[in-house]
Image (tube, rainbow, N blue to C red):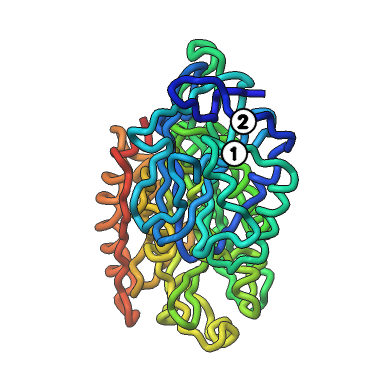
C-alpha cells in the first residue's frame, strides 16, 4: 500500500486512513464522450513524472457549474476520493474557475511514495449532486478510501444521472528516483486517415482521399521524424468508426506521453446536423440514416483529443462543405443530403475541430492547432491533374521542397496563397471558385514540422 503518495498529511503526521481493499478498474471505465461541456484536470509537472517525496499539486476546471468528484487510483489499484475533503468540504465548483487540490494555505500535502508505477487522476463533474453517493462521508478525512461498495454506488449513481456530466483523466508516473525513472525526450506519432470509398451507397465516393493519406504518411515519415513504427495509416474500409476510435481514443494515449508530438490528418467527407449545432466527420461505415451512431461527432472528437493533453497535437483536415455541387469538389451528394433529414450538410472544419476543444481551451487546454483546407462557406477541391486534393498537394510539396525547417504557422502561410491561386485559376467556371485555408492555433510555441 502506498501510504503517502496521494494522502493528505496534516502537519506531517501519520496517515489517517486504512488501506482500501478495492482494485480501481472502475475509475478508468468512467467515461462520457458525449458531454455538452468540458472538464480538465492537470498536475504541476509537465512530464507528469513524480519521484519519491515529490509533492503533487492538482488543478481542476470545468466549463460549466457543477459538482466535482476527484478520484485517484494508485499503481496497484487502490482508489481514494481526493475531493471533496475535510479542507474543501463543498464540492460545488463554478465554471472556468480553477479548483486547486490541496487548497492553498491548508496544512496538508500530497506526497509521493511507494508503490511506484502508472497512476490515474480522474475528475468527474455532474450538473447535480450524485444521489447514490454519501458526499458527507468524504469531508471527514483528508482522503477517503473507496471500497467495492462505494465503487458500485458511484457507478450506479452515474448510470442513473442525467447524461449531462463530464470527465477528464490524466495519467502520472511515480518513480523511486528521478534519475532512474525518466524516459528520454519526446517522440513523434501520426494517425493519417483518408477515405475515398464508403459503405453507404448514398455517400459519393471521392477517389483521391486515400491517396492524400498515403502521400501524407510518406512525407511525415521522410521529413517530419515520424518513425514508421509510430505511423498509423487508415484508408477506406479500414477507417471504420470503431477502428478510428480504438486508435485515437485508446492507442494514442497509451503509446504517447506528455511532451510527444501527435499529427492527425484526415481527408474525406464532413457534414453538419440539420439544426446546424453539431458537426461530424464521415468514416467508412458512416450512414446518413444513423448520424449519432455512425458518424464521428464533434463533441466526441474533442473528448478524444483531450486524452492527448500534454502532447503537442496538430490536426490537418482536408474536407469541405456541400453548399454546391461543383465539379472536382469534395462535396456530399444531394441523395445524402436528403437522407440527413433534408439537412443543409455543411463542412465547417474549424467549428468541428474546436467546438468541444474550445471548451477545453477555455479551461486550460494547450498545445493543439488545426489547419483546415477551406472555410465554412467553401468547398475543397481535387486537383485537375487528379493526383491529390489541392490542399494536400501543397502541404506535402511545401514540406518536401523546403530547404529550411518550417513551423506549422509558416506552413499555413505558405500553403494558403498557393491553394487560393490554384483554385481561382482552375475553377473560374464554378459558382464558388474560392478556397481559403484557415487555422486555429493554440500552440504554446510554434511546432517545427521538419527539424
Q: Give the quarter of the figure containing the N terminus.
A: top right
Q: Residue at x 41, y 61 (%)?
A: 65
Place of residue 265 in the rendered image (x, y in percent of width and height, measured from the top left): 48, 51
Residue 405's place in the image compared with 375, above or below, is above
Q: CA–CA distance between discs 2 and 1?
A: 7 Å
- Nearer to the camera, 90 or 202: 90
- Labels 2 and 1 touching (C-beta < 8 A): yes
Q: Give the quarter of the figure containing the C terminus.
A: top left
Place of residue 290 in the rendered image (x, y in percent of width and height, measured from the top left): 64, 76
Q: Residues within 10 Å of mark 2 (few under 14, many from 20)?
A: some
Left or right for 31, reference 104: right
Q: Residue at x 36, y 54 (%)?
A: 371
Q: Residue at x 66, y 66 (%)?
A: 160
**Mark closer to the chain start, 2 or 1:** 2
Residue 212's place in the image compared with 164, above or below, is above
Place of residue 141 in the rendered image (x, y in percent of width and height, measured from the top left): 54, 37
Q: Is residue 397 visible?
A: no
Q: Secondary structure at mark 2?
A: loop
Q: Residue at x 52, y 22 (%)?
A: 112
The label shown at residue 17 is 2
The label shown at residue 331 is none
Q: Which residue is mark 1?
A: 144
Amino acid at each position: 500500500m502506498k501510504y503517502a503518495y496521494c494522502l493528505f498529511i496534516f502537519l506531517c503526521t501519520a496517515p489517517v486512513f486504512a488501506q482500501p481493499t478495492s482494485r480501481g478498474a472502475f475509475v478508468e471505465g468512467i467515461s462520457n464522450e458525449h458531454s455538452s461541456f468540458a472538464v480538465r484536470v492537470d498536475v504541476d509537472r509537465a512530464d507528469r513524472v513524480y519521484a519519491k517525496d515529490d509533492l503533487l499539486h492538482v488543478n481542476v476546471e470545468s466549463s460549466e457549474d457543477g459538482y466535482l468528484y476527484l478520484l485517484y487510483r494508485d499503481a496497484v489499484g487502490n482508489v481514494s476520493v481526493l475531493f471533496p475533503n475535510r479542507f474543501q468540504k463543498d464540492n460545488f465548483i463554478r465554471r472556468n474557475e480553477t479548483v486547486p487540490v490541496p487548497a492553498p494555505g491548508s496544512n496538508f500535502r500530497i506526497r509521493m511514495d511507494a508503490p511506484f508505477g502508472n497512476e490515474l487522476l480522474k475528475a468527474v463533474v455532474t450538473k447535480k449532486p450524485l444521489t447514490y453517493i454519501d458526499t458527507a462521508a468524504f469531508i471527514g478525512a483528508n482522503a477517503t478510501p473507496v471500497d467495492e461498495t462505494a465503487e458500485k454506488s458511484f457507478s450506479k449513481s452515474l448510470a442513473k444521472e442525467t447524461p449531462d456530466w463530464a470527465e477528464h483523466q490524466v495519467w502520472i508516473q511515480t518513480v523511486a528516483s528521478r534519475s532512474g525513472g525518466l524516459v528520454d525526450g519526446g517522440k513523434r506519432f501520426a494517425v493519417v486517415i483518408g477515405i475515398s470509398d464508403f459503405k453507404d451507397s448514398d455517400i459519393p465516393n471521392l477517389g483521391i482521399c486515400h491517396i492524400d493519406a498515403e502521400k501524407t504518411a510518406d512525407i511525415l515519415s521522410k521529413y517530419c521524424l515520424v518513425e514508421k513504427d509510430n505511423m498509423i495509416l487508415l484508408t477506406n474500409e479500414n477507417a471504420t468508426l470503431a477502428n478510428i476510435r480504438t486508435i485515437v481514443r485508446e492507442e494514442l494515449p497509451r503509446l504517447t506521453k506528455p511532451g510527444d508530438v501527435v499529427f492527425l490528418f484526415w481527408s474525406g467527407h464532413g457534414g453538419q446536423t440539420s439544426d446546424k449545432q453539431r458537426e461530424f466527420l464521415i468514416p467508412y461505415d458512416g450512414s446518413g440514416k444513423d448520424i449519432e451512431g455512425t458518424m464521428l461527432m464533434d463533441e466526441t472528437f474533442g473528448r478524444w483529443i483531450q486524452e492527448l493533453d500534454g502532447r503537442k497535437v496538430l490536426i490537418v483536415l482536408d474536407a469541405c462543405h456541400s453548399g454546391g455541387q461543383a465539379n472536382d469538389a469534395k462535396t456530399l451528394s444531394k441523395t445524402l443530403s436528403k437522407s440527413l433529414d433534408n439537412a443543409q450538410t455543411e463542412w465547417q472544419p474549424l467549428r468541428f475541430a474546436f467546438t468541444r476543444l474550445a471548451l477545453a481551451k477555455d479551461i486550460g487546454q494547450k498545445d493543439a492547432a488545426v489547419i483546415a483546407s477551406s472555410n465554412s462557406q467553401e468547398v475543397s477541391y481535387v486537383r485537375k491533374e487528379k493526383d491529390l486534393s489541392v490542399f494536400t498537394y501543397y502541404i506535402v510539396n511545401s514540406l518536401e521542397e523546403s530547404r529550411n525547417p518550417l513551423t506549422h504557422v509558416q506552413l499555413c502561410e505558405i500553403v494558403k496563397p498557393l491553394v487560393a491561386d490554384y483554385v481561382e485559376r482552375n475553377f473560374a467556371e464554378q459558382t464558388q471558385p474560392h478556397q481559403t485555408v484557415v487555422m486555429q492555433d493554440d500552440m504554446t510555441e510554434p511546432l517545427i514540422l521538419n527539424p
